[in-house]
Amino acid sequence: MQAELDTICAQITPSGCGGVGIIRLSGPQALPIGQSLTHNPGFARQAHYGPFYDTKGEQLDIGISLYFPEPNSFTGEDVFELQGHGGQVIQDILLKQLNQMGARLARPGEFSERAFINNKLDLAQAEAISDLIQASSAQAARNAIRSLKGDFSKYINQLVEALTKLRLYLEATIDFPEEEIDLLTDSYIVNQLTSIKDQLNMVLQQAKQGSLLQEGMQVVIAGKPNAGKSSLLNALAGQERAIVSNIAGTTRDLLRETIQIDGLPIHITDTAGLRKAKDQIEQLGIERAKAAIEQADRLILVQDIKDTTPLAELWKQLMGNHPLPQHLTLVSNKIDLCEQNPTIKITPQVTCITVSAKHQQGIDLIRQHLQNCAGYQITNEGSFSARRRHMDALCRAQHHLTRGAKQLAKRHIELLAEDLRQAQNSLGEITGTFTSDDLLGRIFSTFCIGK
């Protein structure tokens, strides 16, 4: 990607009323446009207080302006900031005036995108900015700060450097076969490959924790009508989010709620009761329920404890010929009617938990179970912010290293070298070394405007 030559502007404080509203300009015309508006003399990183004018000399606002010359700015370009009053009307007036002066409105994430293009940040650091803004817990925010400082990138760069050195050694071996190096007894290759695999596994585990904290876990609650799905949602959420009624089919659409378990975001979806629909609206709700089930990280199937239908038969009644998912937890609800205590039973096929959602009995068992399913560990050290795309890239790199070790055992040196190359490319996608323009566009489009 190449930086565009136009100058962009955007409001970088939230829309609405506030004490201060900030507008940022970046690009080759940021200083002359800013000076025309504020009469700022343009001293680097010095606050200038005064009126903001339109092109006719009429005062629009009054406040502070700051100039950050390239390359010592966030974007690596000339940056000019206006800190005026926080009313949305005046912010819109200033933006309109800047448009007339030649600055266009920035796209979502365009300031961070330019910082990446100008080598002020790598891609993992740029994404950490968005992660920090959207952090849903204190630990997620701390992890995002670590990634923004470059902790995640440091690990990736170390792995890439180690792979580069090993690839150079292998290429020399391939190019000069007369040296007759026995790769199976060459301790350097074996030790280096083992060391890289161990380092990658460590980074993968830390990234998994960061990804869980940032993106959370998708949990879907499903079952027959009146099994207690909505009561379970309310119990997990700690408030009355869903309507609870003895009338079957009360829930017609998907109802979503996000809770936190020791900082881990759990995105819960309550679905319509699965049965033969009695009308078109209920049928639509059931279809949406089935679609949500397909996308779930964990499926909680709620069954009335008095319903003795075996799991396999129950699943067939609800989902037809769909195979029984491995990520399923069976919750037998309404133990208060049988005067039973909450229990949890873990088998290789399924985990069964007995609860009373109405009386909040056994809810802690479900919470702990969800943490265990996610592989979440409470820790304040060594974690960094990560996304699912990072996990995908790390897993692909791990796959290539594992396959490369097998190629080494078979003396397929050229194939080992190719696996190492692909592992390095996968890791490069994380920091942006080998990332396509199309992927970059999708990543930055998810940022908020102003960043």
Image (cartoon, rainbow, N blue to C red):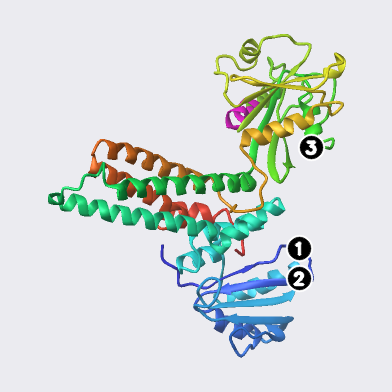
Relative image position of residue 168 (x, y in whole percent):
27, 56
Query: Can you say whether 57 is above or below 114 in the image?
Result: below
- Residue type highlighted by circle 3: Ala
Q: Quadrant of the N terminus?
A: bottom left
> Circle 2 sits on which residue?
86
Q: Are marks 3 and 1 in contact (CB under 8 Å)?
A: no
> Circle 3 sits on which residue?
237
Q: Label 1: how many residues lie within 10 Å, few (<14), some (14-19) or many (20+)?
A: few
Considering the numbered disc 3 on the image, is that residue within a helix, a strand or a loop? helix
Query: Can you say whether 135 is above or below 244 in the image?
Result: below
Q: Quadrant of the C terminus?
A: bottom right
- Residue type highlighted by circle 2: Gly
Queried whether the magenta region covers residue 243, the answer comes back as no
Query: Can you say whether 128 is above or below 9 in the image?
Result: above
Residue 16: assigned label:
1
Q: Are marks 1 and 2 in contact (CB under 8 Å)?
A: yes
Considering the numbered disc 2 on the image, is that residue within a helix, a strand or a loop? loop
Residue ID at (72%, 16%)? 278
- Which badge, 1 or 2, comes first in the chain's sequence? 1
Residue 354: assigned label:
none
CA gap between label 3 and label 1 equals 30 Å
The answer to whether residue 299 shows anywhere in this view is yes
Residue 146 shown left or right of residue 261 in the figure = left
Residue ID at (50%, 65%)? 121
Q: Which label sits in the foreground, 3 or 1?
A: 3
The residues colored magenta run 288-296
CA gap between label 2 and label 3 equals 35 Å
CA gap between label 1 and label 2 equals 7 Å
Relative image position of residue 125 (x, y in whole percent):
54, 60
- Residue type highlighted by circle 1: Gly
